[in-house]
Image (tube, rainbow, N blue to C red):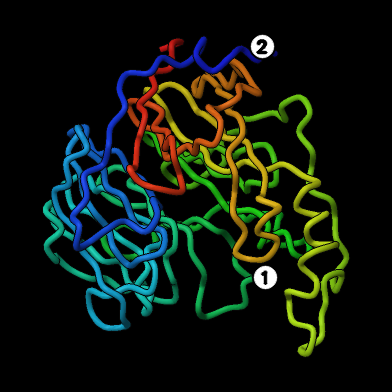
Amino acid sequence: MPSPPFDEVFEMVEVIELGEDPSDSIAAIGEFVERRDGGFVIADRYLPRVRTYRADGTLEAGFGRFGDGPWEFRRIRSVAEMADGRIVVTGAQNGSLTYLAADLTPDSMSVIENHVPQMVLPMGREIVFSGLRTDIDVTQMDGNFHRLVDGAVAWTSWKSLVGRQPYWGGLGSLHAAVRGDSLYVMAGLLYPATILNGAGDSVGTIGTLPAGFRRVPEIEAGAFAYTSEEGPAAQAGNPIERLIESFDLVTSMDVVGGDYLVFTVGRLDPARPWFPFRELDVSVEAYDRHTGRKLFENVRLPEGSKVLGGGRYLHVLLNPDIPPWLIARYELLLS
């Protein structure tokens, strides 16, 4: 499988510098969504704020404050643009879906009975979300993804195997991407991704391990137990640090240019050897999402960069830790 240099398969279209309001500075770039008009929505990774930008990076609007009341968030978990232009946000303490108008003015809030939505994605005029059930134990859940139709859950599908292994749930995230009536879902620790249709049926898989990919080891329950006197810091320097240096994982999955599914492969940061872990992006691989054919793998990303998301282009944050926040738009040359 070819592993060409990054600039042989991706062409930089432009670099955008995000505009900032000095009184509302970005703490860190979090969830990213490209909008249909070419602009984008970005959630702050640490602050309960969501912001919209024009295609050139000009700041348009910001919304959100910390709290447990209406229109307040503990932490923004996910954002998506609905077919009607509204923005839907998850992260409220009561588990509600928060709907904002295109200019981020409050629109409505919706609580889904027995569910706490986390990741949310548009699918047609409705949404698909991942999240926990509040009425049953997590081990009894019959699926991780749910389609919401007319305010009610129409179907539930795809149960991750990660939950069967101690600790794996904290070492990697779930990923999903939607294009048309296809939903691609996977656990970052496990290949392949599953393809679901609009009815929630599994219709195939996509993705193969890239050369050199190191699988996460199986770990016995209690392997990282510590006493209350020791605390997690006492354990962080040795067995956990060795563990997170020992395996690779998929850090994101995005549809790019409509026809291609791009996996970002990375690792956990050994300098942050305790939960919540920090994921470092290393390389990308791409598939023709219609045929499942892998096009390339182990294509190294620009040093120190982070993949934000897909859309018309692959959007890459060039300096993830400090402003100015620079986002590069790359066109996949196969398209």
Q: Quadrant of the C terminus?
A: top left
- Residue 313 in the image: above or below residue 43: above
Q: Quadrant of the N terminus?
A: top right
Residue 288: x, y in percent?
A: 52, 19
Residue at which label 2 appears: 2
Question: Which residue sits at x=41%, y=58%?
Answer: 45
- Residue 160 in the image: above or below residue 288: below
Local crowd at mark 1 within 10 Å, few (<14), some, or many (≥20)? few
- Left or right: 160 as drawn, with respect to 254: right
Pointer 2 with pointer 1, Cβ within 8 A: no
Q: How many labels, in total?
A: 2
Question: Which residue sits at x=50%, y=55%?
Answer: 145
Helix, strand or loop at label 1? It is helix
Residue 106's quadrant in the figure? bottom left
Residue 316: x, y in percent?
A: 42, 33
Helix, strand or loop at label 2? It is loop
Residue at which label 1 appears: 139
Question: Which residue sits at x=35%, y=34%?
Answer: 327
Residue 241: x, y in percent?
A: 78, 57
- Residue 141 in the image: above or below residue 192: below
Amino acid bearing label 1: Thr
Local crowd at mark 2 within 10 Å, few (<14), some, or many (≥20)? few
Cα distance in 3D space between marks 2 and 1: 40 Å
- Left or right: 333 as drawn, with respect to 124: right
Question: Which residue sits at x=50%, y=28%?
Answer: 261
- Left or right: 213 as drawn, with respect to 308: right
Tag in front: 2 or 1: 2
Q: Earlier in the sequence, mark 2 or mark 1?
A: 2
Amino acid bearing label 2: Pro
